[in-house]
Image (cartoon, helix red, strand yellow):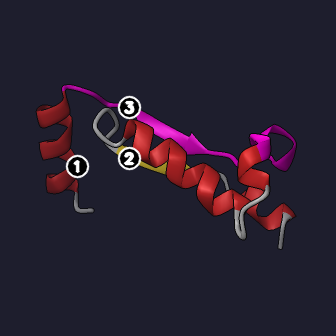
Protein backbone atom coordinates (compact mmCIF):
# COMPACT_ATOMS: atom_id res chain seq x y z
CA UNK A 1 0.00 0.00 0.00
CA UNK A 2 1.36 3.40 -0.94
CA UNK A 3 1.06 6.42 1.33
CA UNK A 4 -1.50 7.83 -1.10
CA UNK A 5 -3.61 4.66 -0.84
CA UNK A 6 -3.30 4.76 2.95
CA UNK A 7 -4.42 8.39 3.00
CA UNK A 8 -7.42 7.52 0.81
CA UNK A 9 -8.40 4.67 3.16
CA UNK A 10 -8.11 6.97 6.20
CA UNK A 11 -10.44 9.48 4.54
CA UNK A 12 -12.84 6.81 3.29
CA UNK A 13 -13.12 4.97 6.60
CA UNK A 14 -12.68 8.03 8.82
CA UNK A 15 -10.27 5.95 10.84
CA UNK A 16 -6.60 5.60 11.71
CA UNK A 17 -7.18 2.14 13.20
CA UNK A 18 -4.41 -0.41 12.74
CA UNK A 19 -5.18 -3.91 14.05
CA UNK A 20 -2.38 -5.98 15.53
CA UNK A 21 -2.22 -9.64 14.56
CA UNK A 22 -0.72 -11.38 17.59
CA UNK A 23 -1.62 -15.08 17.41
CA UNK A 24 -1.23 -16.91 20.70
CA UNK A 25 -2.26 -20.57 20.50
CA UNK A 26 -3.41 -20.49 24.14
CA UNK A 27 -6.00 -17.83 23.23
CA UNK A 28 -7.25 -19.19 19.89
CA UNK A 29 -10.80 -20.58 20.14
CA UNK A 30 -10.94 -24.40 20.33
CA UNK A 31 -12.88 -24.78 17.06
CA UNK A 32 -10.04 -23.06 15.19
CA UNK A 33 -7.39 -25.23 16.83
CA UNK A 34 -8.94 -28.20 15.05
CA UNK A 35 -8.22 -26.71 11.60
CA UNK A 36 -5.17 -27.47 9.47
CA UNK A 37 -3.70 -23.99 10.11
CA UNK A 38 -5.20 -22.43 13.27
CA UNK A 39 -3.05 -19.29 13.16
CA UNK A 40 -4.11 -18.55 9.58
CA UNK A 41 -7.78 -19.17 10.40
CA UNK A 42 -7.58 -17.01 13.55
CA UNK A 43 -5.99 -14.09 11.68
CA UNK A 44 -8.43 -14.51 8.78
CA UNK A 45 -11.37 -14.31 11.19
CA UNK A 46 -9.96 -11.09 12.67
CA UNK A 47 -9.39 -9.58 9.22
CA UNK A 48 -12.85 -10.62 8.00
CA UNK A 49 -14.44 -9.00 11.08
CA UNK A 50 -12.48 -5.73 10.89
CA UNK A 51 -11.61 -5.04 7.24
CA UNK A 52 -14.29 -2.38 6.89
CA UNK A 53 -13.08 -0.53 10.01
CA UNK A 54 -9.30 -0.55 9.80
CA UNK A 55 -6.77 0.97 7.44
CA UNK A 56 -4.07 -1.58 8.13
CA UNK A 57 -2.81 -4.64 9.96
CA UNK A 58 0.41 -5.12 11.89
CA UNK A 59 1.60 -8.68 12.31
CA UNK A 60 3.68 -9.06 15.46
CA UNK A 61 6.63 -11.08 14.20
CA UNK A 62 7.56 -12.33 17.67
CA UNK A 63 4.33 -14.34 17.85
CA UNK A 64 4.92 -15.86 14.41
CA UNK A 65 8.60 -16.58 15.08
CA UNK A 66 7.67 -18.48 18.23
CA UNK A 67 5.86 -21.03 16.06
CA UNK A 68 8.62 -21.38 13.47
> Gap in Å between the C-alphas at discs 1 and 2?
8 Å
Q: Quadrant of residue 2?
A: bottom left
Dot 3: element: loop
**How dense is the environment of label 3, judged by Cα within 10 Å: few (below 14), some, or many (20 and up)?**
some
Return the x and y of residue 38 as percentages of the image width and height.
Answer: 71, 59
Q: Which mark is residue 6?
A: 1
- Which quadrant does the N terminus fall into? bottom left
**Left or right placement of residue 64 versus residue 6 in this view:** right
Q: Is residue 54 above or below residue 44?
A: above
Q: Is there a contact, CB below 8 Å, between mark 2 and mark 3?
A: no
> Gap in Å between the C-alphas at discs 3 and 1?
11 Å
Query: Which residues are drawn in magenta?
Result: 14-30
**Left or right placement of residue 29 versus residue 11 in this view:** right
Confirm whether residue 13 shows in the render: yes
Please name the residue shown 61% across and 57% down the image.
Answer: 41
User: Badge 2 is on which residue?
Assistant: 56
Q: Is residue 28 above or below residue 41?
A: above
Return the x and y of residue 9 as percentages of the image width and height.
Answer: 18, 43
- Which quadrant does the C terminus fall into? bottom right
**Left or right placement of residue 68 versus residue 21 in this view:** right
**How dense is the environment of label 1, judged by Cα within 10 Å: few (below 14), some, or many (20 and up)?**
some
Comparing 54 with 41, the one in front is 41
Confirm whether residue 59 shows in the render: no
The answer to if 24 sits in the magenta stretch is yes
Q: Quadrant of residue 13?
A: top left
User: Badge 3 is on which residue?
Assistant: 17
Q: Is there a contact, CB below 8 Å, between mark 1 and mark 2?
A: yes
Return the x and y of residue 26 as percentages of the image width and height.
Answer: 87, 42
Please name the residue shown 58% across and 52% down the image.
Answer: 43
The outermost residue toward the top is 14
- Mark 3 / mark 1, whichever is N-terminal: 1
Please name the residue shown 12% across and 33% down the image.
Answer: 11
Amino acid sequence: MTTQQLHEQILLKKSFLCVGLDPDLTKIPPHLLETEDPIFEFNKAIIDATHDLTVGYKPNTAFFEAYG
